[in-house]
Amino acid sequence: MPRSGLDTARVVHEAARIADTDGLAEATLARVAQSLGVRAPSLYNHVEGLPGMLRQITILSLGELTDVMRDAAIGRAGEDALRSVARAYRAYALEHPGRYAATIRAPTPDDAELVAASLRAVEVIIAVLRAWGFTGNEVLHRVRVIRSALHGFITIEAEGGFGLALSLDESFEMMLQTLVAGLEQG
């Protein structure tokens, strides 16, 4: 019988909190159970083991990231929308590093719920890219370019890899300008 006050959402949110503070690899059943004051086996009433809990963190995180990007894009178009979405993406990743880490891996095609969550996030970027008239595979290639550039910058920043005493915000804006220039070139 599930413990009173303990449900799937509470388990997943606690796992996500641990992932953000200590890293995704630290979001284990034992660690989450300890944090919630229960024994690890009781978590199986709420998640399908560690893979199920990590999957739920990914779904939660993709939903949050999608909302953040969508909110950033509302009322904007073209370069303004791209810059706003990119800044929101970066802010989310830096504020929620464990959750962000959960969003990177592509879902397996047989997991319809996870595929749908991933697609909703990608669709925000696709909508932004419509301003440049890209369609089909050309828009998908550009989604990959944008995600790769953002992920690369964010990862280096989060790991302390930018050691020079230069403004990270200024470097980020220069990267965005380079992306915009590339999009305008077609």
Image (cartoon, grey):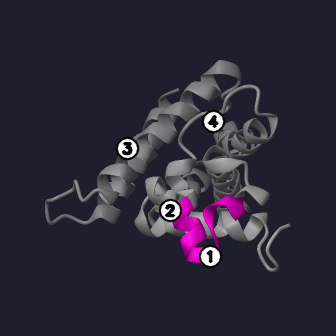
> What type is the residue that disc 3 sits on?
Gly
Whether pointer 4 and pointer 1 mark residues with C-beta atoms closer than 8 Å, the reply is no
Residue for point 67% across, 40% down = 122
- For marks 4 and 1, give the one nearer the viewer: 1
Of mark 2 and mark 1, the one earlier in the sequence is 2
Whether 46 is drawn above or below 35: the answer is: above
The image shows residue 101 at horizontal and vertical percentages of 49, 50
The image shows residue 162 at horizontal and vertical percentages of 21, 56
Residue 26 is left or right of residue 82, and the answer is left
Provide the residue designation for mark 2.
19
Provide the residue designation for mark 3.
152
> What type is the residue that disc 1 sits on?
Leu
Of mark 2 and mark 4, the one earlier in the sequence is 2
Residue 50 in sight here: yes
How far, Cα to Cα, is label 2 from label 4?
Answer: 37 Å
How far, Cα to Cα, is label 3 from label 4?
Answer: 23 Å
Which residue occupies the foreground of this view, 180 or 24? 24
Of mark 4 and mark 1, the one earlier in the sequence is 1
Label ID, residue 132: 4
Label ID, residue 36: 1
